[in-house]
Image: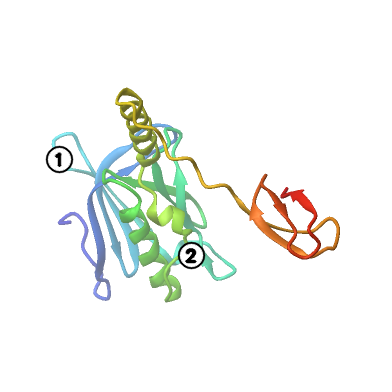
Amino acid sequence: MGDYKLEINEGIVLKNQNAFHPVGKKIGSMGELILTNLNIIYIKKGMLGGTKEVIKLPLNQIKIIDGNPQIRLGRRTNGTTQMEIYFFNSEECFYFNDFGNKELIKWIDKVHEILTGEPAKIDEDDRNYVPGLSEVANTLKESIGTFKQAFGIKEKKQEKEKMATRCISCDAPLFGEKGATIKCKYCGVKQTIK
């Protein structure tokens, strides 16, 4: 942080030492990303850890459409999540070497709070997304199925879907499992629930 001097009325809100600033499809350089009440600062590090470049992105230059700052979660071509920020004259992207979306969402929320006083409107699925989790879950499910099969453990039958319909004869309400044959308690006609 020694390579950037805060303005008199500027204070640090968030910092991340493992931030990447991709350029096009390239991974981009690693550096330190700092959010202040006035700016987003990216300190690009060189090969030996020294400062290569300091990029200052003023928050008041972020586009705001219908009261919504243009900063959001996006995806890189390799599927990793990144923070996309749309300024009046440029588009900047950052991602962190941290696990999951939590850090990115924390940054998006803070930028929204600084600009609007409220956190960002991000889907719950994105807030809870953990990269690779669905693949791990599928692998576990397959492994458990193989284990059960090897030891002769039989799967419980799934409960049939409950349905509500009307009697074909007297139009009375009928309830039961889908595909089951039941007798109407009002008129006595047997019928299959569909």
- Residue 1: x percent and y percent? 17, 56
List the single residue furthest toward the right. 169
Residue linked to disc 1:
49
Local SS, label 2: loop
Residue in the picture at 64% in, 55% down: 176
Q: Residue type at mark 2?
A: Lys
Local SS, label 1: loop
Label 2 or label 1, whichever comes before in sequence order: 1
Residue in the picture at 35% in, 66% down: 110
Question: Which numbered circle lies on residue 121?
Answer: 2
Q: Quadrant of residue 175?
A: bottom right
Please say if 97 is above or below 42: above
List the single residue furthest toward the front. 188
- Residue 137: x percent and y percent? 36, 38
Q: Residue type at mark 1?
A: Gly
Please say if 172 is above or below 125: below
List the single residue furthest toward the top. 150
Q: CA distance from mark 2 to mark 1?
A: 36 Å
Q: Is residue 121 visible?
A: yes
Within 10 angstroms of label 1, few (less than 14), some, or many (20 or more) residues? few
Residue in the picture at 20% in, 38% down: 46
Within 10 angstroms of label 2, few (less than 14), some, or many (20 or more) residues? few
User: Please, which colouring scheme is shown?
Assistant: rainbow
Q: Is residue 85 visible?
A: no
Q: Nearer the viewer, mark 2 or mark 1?
A: 2
Using residue 179 as the reference point, say whether residue 87 is left or right of it.
Answer: left
Considering depth in this image, is 97 or 159 the residue closer to the camera?
A: 159
Please say if 163 is above or below 52: below
- Residue 72: x percent and y percent? 46, 55
Q: Quadrant of residue 10?
A: bottom left
